Image: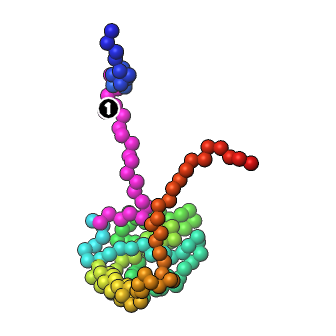
Amino acid sequence: MARVSRVAQSRTATTRSSDMRPQSETHFQSKLHIPSNKIPDGMTYAWVRESTLNEPDPDNMTDRMVRGWQPVPAARHSEMVPPPLPGHEGMEATVIRRGGLILCERITADVEMSRQERDIENMEVLQDVAWTGQSDPNMPRIDDSSVGFERVTSFKD
């Protein structure tokens, strides 16, 4: 008598079609995601912290605005602005907010120039570090000696 495997006996293989039920959506979309086709050419978007745990952080917004970041007008992306909360019906949103962040924009060329300046500054700092040889006793060392493990099967009191 020939032996039939359990896989071949699966009822799902014979009774269900794969297209009976649509596949569930598995792609996570962050509430901070902005499709690239919505960002104007020549501009870069970034979420800038306005508050942390409902504590305002005006210094951060001021610092970013001094560096050239400006809030994106809510009218440009009205689909990203939620309807007003009950009791605030007459108030119109002028910026786009999400969880203590404000959507801001800056000219892409300026963003790239700032990144290059930061990268150059970081490289200069790294090059200015006085690298010493292995003879310096204060230098961190990597111990690459082998470490052995043994299994303990019983304990003695």
Residue 24: x and y in percent read: 39, 42
Magenta stretch, main secondary structure, is loop
In the rendered image, the vertical position of residue 44 relative to residue 128, given as above or below? above
Please give left or right for residue 99 compared with residue 125 in the image. Answer: right
In the rendered image, the vertical position of residue 39 relative to residue 62, given as above or below? above
- For the question of whether residue 99 can be seen, the reply is yes
Along the line of sight, which residue is nearer the eye, 58 or 135? Answer: 135
Which picture quadrant has residue 65? bottom left
Question: Pointer 1: residues within 10 angstroms few (<14), some, or many (20+)?
Answer: few
Residue that extends furthest to the top in the rendered view of this protein: 1
In the rendered image, the vertical position of residue 153 relative to residue 56, given as above or below? above
Which picture quadrant has residue 107? bottom left
- Residue 20 falls inside the magenta stretch: yes
Along the line of sight, which residue is nearer the eye, 138 or 77? Answer: 138
- Residue 102 falls inside the magenta stretch: no
Residue ID at (28%, 73%)? 40
- Total labels drawn: 1
Residue 57: x and y in percent read: 54, 79
The three-letter amino acid code for the residue at tag 1 is Ser
Along the line of sight, which residue is nearer the eye, 147 or 60? Answer: 147
Please give left or right for residue 52 compared with residue 101 in the image. Answer: right
Numbered disc 1: secondary structure: loop
Residue ID at (50%, 83%)? 137
Residue ID at (36%, 65%)? 34
- Residue interval drawn in magenta: 14-36
Along the line of sight, which residue is nearer the eye, 100 or 137? Answer: 137
Please give left or right for residue 118 compared with residue 87 in the image. Answer: left
In the rendered image, the vertical position of residue 68 relative to residue 49, given as above or below? below
- For the question of whether residue 121 can be seen, the reply is no
Residue 52: x and y in percent read: 56, 73
Quickly name the residue at label 1.
18
